[in-house]
Amino acid sequence: MVINLITFASLLHKQASVRSSHEIVLAELEKYFTVRFVDYQQMNSLTPDDFSILFIATGGVERLVMQHFEQLPRPTILLADGMQNSLAAALEISSWLRTRGMRSEILHGELTEIIKRLLVMYNNFKAQRKLNGSRIGVIGTPSSWLISSNVDYLLAKRRWGIEYTDIPLERVTEYFNSISDDEVGNACAELAEKALACREASPEDMLKAMKIYKALKRIVEEEKLAALTLSCFKLIESTGTSGCLALSLLNDEGIIAGCEGDLQSIFTMLITKTLTGQAAFMANPSMINARTNEIILAHCTIGLKQTEQFILRSHFETDMSIGIQGLLPLGDVTIVKCGGECLDEYYLTTGRLTENTNYINMCRTQVRIKLDSPASYFLKNPLGNHHILVHGNYKTLFDEFLQVNACKRTE
């Protein structure tokens, strides 16, 4: 892990004295990071992929920072141990930066806490760089009932560096029609062998669903997509098959794939994978008990690798094609949702998955969650319908990342 210390020191101090004055904090940094000292006049040599912070080594550097405002890393992290009036200068600089709309934070105090904070910031930085330039394919159009899940493509790109790209659903149909049964037969047989059971679905349903997977995989490769969201109900109208199996298999391969053309949920799934390394479950809150703080999340697709076992079913609403009934491991989970047209709001909670339910009037994969926060959020102030579940407790990780990106948390 390389950390670039952009050093601001008064001209009255020699480089050797700067190092000796801050030996304690610098020695601690070098236990955890490869530290590179960069004079503020050489900031142009750094790239956007370099993790950089300002090392305020002495007082009297406030105007130097002002003069190099456009070149400063954003957000701006200032390291000041207090020696040589460095903290006084950092306070003045931080206040000045905030008046110009730039986020900043001063690292000061106990060395162990400085290191912990730097590690969090480093991980956030790496996640932001990984997101930057990611392409999300919007295949078809968002479902008509998603009236509160819009995203402004331009604002999302400015804030997050991601790019939504519209892809006609007809392209999926064209590729689907060009694939023969023989091309997918073996894959269908292998999948059926792994399933705990096959219920409503027929062999013909399986062949058609696997062709959708092949068609979407081709589009992902041609368009260089990191993620995609699919207009699944319109797909059923045009091909007679759902995208549930295809989305499941794509998620297993690390290609983030969501349903119903939901623009906000696919972004949430993308940052979930970026931060945690895990695929997530996009689902409908289908039952809510505000007294016990329990909810049931349900949907007809989930990555098979997220399950302990799975059953091949039909798609719930249409009773056609292939749906996935996944049986998930019990234990700690995190539920998150990013919302707002420029993706600047979020909901976040933890809980425990206590049961895989099997109600006949819900989507196929169903899980009961005992929440660690009031379930009344879903009834009073929800960020739309779909929410995203990932195994494990990642509350701090999400909070740190979304807060540093100036997102507002909804309770």
Image: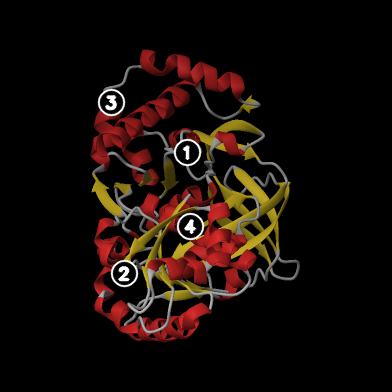
- The residue at the point 32 percent across, 63 percent down is 156
User: Label 3: which residue?
Assistant: 177
Between tags 2 and 3, which lies in front?
Answer: 2
> Which label's residue is closer to the chain start, 1 or 3?
3
Tag 4 secondary structure: helix
The picture places residue 243, in percent across and down from the top left corner, at 42, 38
> Which label's residue is closer to the chain start, 1 or 2?
2
> Which label's residue is closer to the chain start, 4 or 3?
4
Q: Are marks 1 and 2 in contact (CB under 8 Å)?
A: no
Tag 1 secondary structure: helix
Between tags 1 and 3, which lies in front?
Answer: 1
Instruction: State which quadrant residue 193 falls in.
Output: top right
The picture places residue 349, in percent across and down from the top left corner, at 62, 64
What whole-number distance in Å separates the C-alpha atoms at marks 1 and 3?
Answer: 23 Å
- The residue at the point 73 percent across, 48 percent down is 355
What whole-number distance in Å separates the C-alpha atoms at marks 2 and 4?
Answer: 17 Å
Res 122 label: 4
> Which label's residue is closer to the chain start, 4 or 1?
4
User: Label 2: which residue?
Assistant: 72
Q: Amino acid at mark 2?
A: Leu
From this view, report whether residue 15 is shown above or below residue 106. above
What whole-number distance in Å separates the C-alpha atoms at marks 4 and 1?
Answer: 26 Å
The picture places residue 253, in percent across and down from the top left corner, at 46, 33
Tag 2 secondary structure: loop
From this view, report whether residue 409 is shown above or below residue 162. below
